[in-house]
């Protein structure tokens, strides 16, 4: 070995070895988050809530409607034996918010509950009327109090929890007054922007805005490998296209049977039901078809 090679060998050896006494910390990749799906039963409108298990904790996305379904969701959290680090709310409907009370009650840690300003505002507005409507029907199964989000998140803001980034995207009105898509790395929690192959809630008469919010979500979900919907099976970004096709079919059916009128009579509602059941045979939440009829007819008669 000549002198030049010998000194090169020494330099390489020096680079490869830590200085005497230096601490060596190996780089260990953190494990991918694991998403646990809680799919509620019929009494809780088949709504989904999610527990995202990170290395050291859990992030909840929404929480179920009824007291007993919320207790089951809480038991699933307890079974993970990790602290609840955050709760993310997708939108302001009770079938996605009611169970937060049971989820956080009595836990030693206090997890922040995140929502967009528009979601927080809507929730404050509708909480009383929804409670007044549903409590006589659900009695003890309707939670006696609502736990409201306490931490505002802005459109485009990322919160990092246990090393995992969650970004809120405000995609506007749709199934509710304000829809959030929460992205987590390549996955997305889309709330009721997608009610995947179930009959959707159109009673707020915003089918046109809903189609626009699906378009707003498209670039956000362009690289999404998994899309976690508010109801129905976990899918991919094609679920947005399916949801749009349902809404377009529903609007076309209402337009045809209502003939420009702002409301439908019982026979027309039956005709609408027949059309939409044919579009989506055997799907859950058939009762919602007729509930959306007049609001969407009114929407179409005053575009
Ligand atoms: Zn829902």
Image: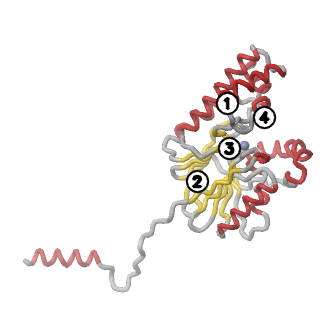
Q: Secondary structure at mark 3?
A: strand
Please, which residue is most extreme toward the bottom here?
Answer: 21
Q: CA distance from mark 3 to mark 1?
A: 19 Å
Q: Is the C-beta of the residue carrying label 3 under 8 Å from the nearest atom of ligand 1? A: yes
Please, which residue is most extreme toward the left here?
Answer: 2
Q: Secondary structure at mark 1?
A: helix
Which residue in the protein does label 1 denote? 209
Q: Is the C-beta of the residue carrying label 1 under 8 Å from the nearest atom of ligand 1? A: no
Mark 1 and mark 2 lie on one chain; the one further toward the N terminus is 2
Which residue in the protein does label 3 denote? 231
Query: Quick check: marks 1 and 2 in contact, CB under 8 Å?
Result: no
- Quarter of the image containing the N terminus? bottom left
Q: CA distance from mark 2 to mark 3?
A: 21 Å
Instruction: Give the image location of residue 31, x and y in percent.
Output: 50, 64
Q: Nearer the viewer, mark 3 or mark 1?
A: 3
Residue at point 64% right, 48% down?
154
Q: Nearer the viewer, mark 2 or mark 3?
A: 3
Mark 3 and mark 1 lie on one chain; the one further toward the N terminus is 1
Q: CA distance from mark 4 to mark 3?
A: 15 Å
Which residue in the protein does label 2 denote? 166
């Amino acid at each position: 070995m000549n002198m030049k090679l010998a000194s090169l060998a020494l330099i390489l050896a020096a680079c490869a070895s830590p200085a005497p006494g230096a601490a060596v910390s190996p780089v260990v990749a953190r494990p991918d988050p694991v998403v646990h799906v809680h799919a509620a039963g019929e009494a809780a409108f088949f709504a989904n809530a999610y527990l995202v298990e990170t290395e050291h904790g859990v992030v909840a996305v929404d929480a179920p409607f009824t007291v007993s379904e919320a207790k089951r969701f809480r038991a699933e959290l307890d079974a993970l034996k990790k602290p609840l680090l955050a709760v993310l709310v997708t939108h302001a409907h009770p079938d996605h918010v009611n169970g937060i009370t049971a989820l956080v009650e009595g836990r030693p840690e206090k997890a922040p509950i995140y929502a967009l300003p528009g979601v927080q505002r809507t929730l404050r507005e509708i909480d009383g009327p929804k409670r007044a409507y549903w409590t006589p029907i659900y009695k003890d199964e309707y939670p006696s109090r609502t736990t409201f989000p306490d931490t505002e998140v802005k459109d485009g803001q990322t919160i990092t929890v246990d090393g995992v980034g969650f970004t809120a995207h405000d995609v506007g009105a749709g199934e509710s007054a304000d829809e959030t898509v929460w992205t987590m790395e390549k996955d997305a929690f889309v709330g009721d922007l997608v009610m995947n192959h179930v009959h959707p809630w159109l009673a707020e008469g915003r089918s046109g805005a809903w189609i626009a919010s699906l378009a707003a979500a498209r670039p956000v979900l362009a690289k999404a490998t998994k899309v976690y919907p508010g109801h129905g099976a976990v899918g991919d970004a094609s679920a947005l296209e399916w949801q749009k096709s349902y809404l377009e079919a529903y609007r076309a059916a209402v337009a045809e049977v209502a003939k420009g009128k702002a409301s439908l009579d019982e026979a027309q509602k039956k005709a609408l039901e027949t059309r939409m059941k044919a579009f989506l045979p055997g799907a859950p939440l058939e009762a919602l078809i007729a509930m959306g009829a007049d609001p969407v007819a009114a929407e179409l008669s005053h575009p």
